[in-house]
Image: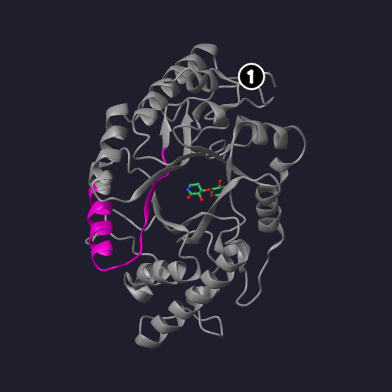
Amino acid sequence: TDIPSLYKVLEKDFILGAEVQPIDLQGDSGKLLKQHFNSIVAGNQMKPESIQPMEGVFNWGPADEIANFARENNLYMRGHTLVWHQQVPKWFFQDKQGKDLTPSPESKQLVLERLEIHIRTLMNRYKDVVDAWDVVNEVIDPSTNDGMRHSEWYQLTGTDYIDTAFRVAHEVDPNAALFINDYNTESDPKKRQILYDFVKAETAKGVPISGVGHQMHISISYPSIQSVRDTFNLFADLGVKQEVTELDMSVYNGSNQNYNPAPDNVLIQQGERYKELFDMFRSMKDKLSRITFWGMSDDTTWLSGRNGHTLDYPLPFDSQYQAKPAYWGMVDSS
Ligand code: XIL
């Protein structure tokens, strides 16, 4: 605990955040959080399936716990997420009898009304503490004919759900930063360009998008730092805010690796890459307002059990809450 506070090392350049679950607020992990981060985001507790599991039934407990921690400790807080195609309950897209809606002007109106109520209710409860919202998450899909994800939202409303979400969010809290958030923006130039063109067209129409969120789930070998730099430079000329919203760095570069524990040389290599990454982030401080990690310590990373890896080690602190070379790489960055 006598090591430098990570957020204080970086606070002249940007805010530093971490994704948390209610359990992380307790005990030693709560202390680690307060020492090293000045912003938090709920990992699941503000998603539609958690907030409104049934129409008109709101489940505030877990989200309140996290929001209260931010209030009590004077942390910034991101809201994640108002609209997504995952972790959204089916009722949004069904009639009162539980039958799937089919596209029509009436079903479109119904879905947009439900969306509006959801956003108003959720944002009103947390607008004193949340300063930035992921209004829509992962709406770009480079494999479709128009580049938009053909989710149930899209099938029933076209892209109007996106316009409605931003317009309503802006009405509820004109001071909040309103983000369109997506993954692979740093690694897939085609997807990046589709997102760029979309944001440009939307803002030209007056849709109040104020920021682009780059999730940035990257790995120890991919993509290049230059590719990440190109990403920030591209969006900078739209004049929108940019944040890194879900940073982590998998130690794997293939699907048939499984470390337990992670070898020292791999963790050292990860530390060097974190330093290079943060050297670049810091050189971009005028274009980047916050970096949020998706977690704090490797024991709870969402990547363990995914992509064929039983355990992954993507974060600044290890499972015993000790600083990794990744942490020192960031402290040594300039
Ligand atoms: C993840 C959570 O961390 C997991 O606990 C949950 O099971 C699935 O969702 N992109 C996002 C986040 O925008 O909401 C996801 O969070 C990770 C990928």
Side of 272 where 225 appears, left or right? left
Q: What element carries label 1?
A: loop
Q: Where's residue 253, x and y in %? A: 40, 26
Q: In which quarter of the image is the C terminus?
A: top left
Residue highlighted by disc 1: 3
The tally of labels here is: 1
Q: Quadrant of residue 189?
A: top left
Residue drawn at 58 percent across, 63 percent down: 49
Look at the image and say whether residue 206 sits in the magenta stretch. yes
200, 118: nearer the viewer: 200
Residue drawn at 30 percent across, 60 percent down: 148
Q: Where's residue 204, x and y in %? A: 23, 64
**Range of the magenta residues?**
193-216
Q: Residue furthest bottom?
A: 106
Side of 262 where 165 appears, left or right? left
Q: Can residue 253 be seen in this view?
A: no
The vertical placement of 90 against 46, above or below, is: below
Q: Is residue 21 visible?
A: yes
Q: In which quarter of the image is the N terminus?
A: top right
Q: Quadrant of residue 118?
A: bottom right
Residue drawn at 62 percent across, 66 percent down: 125
Q: Where's residue 60, x and y in %? A: 68, 63
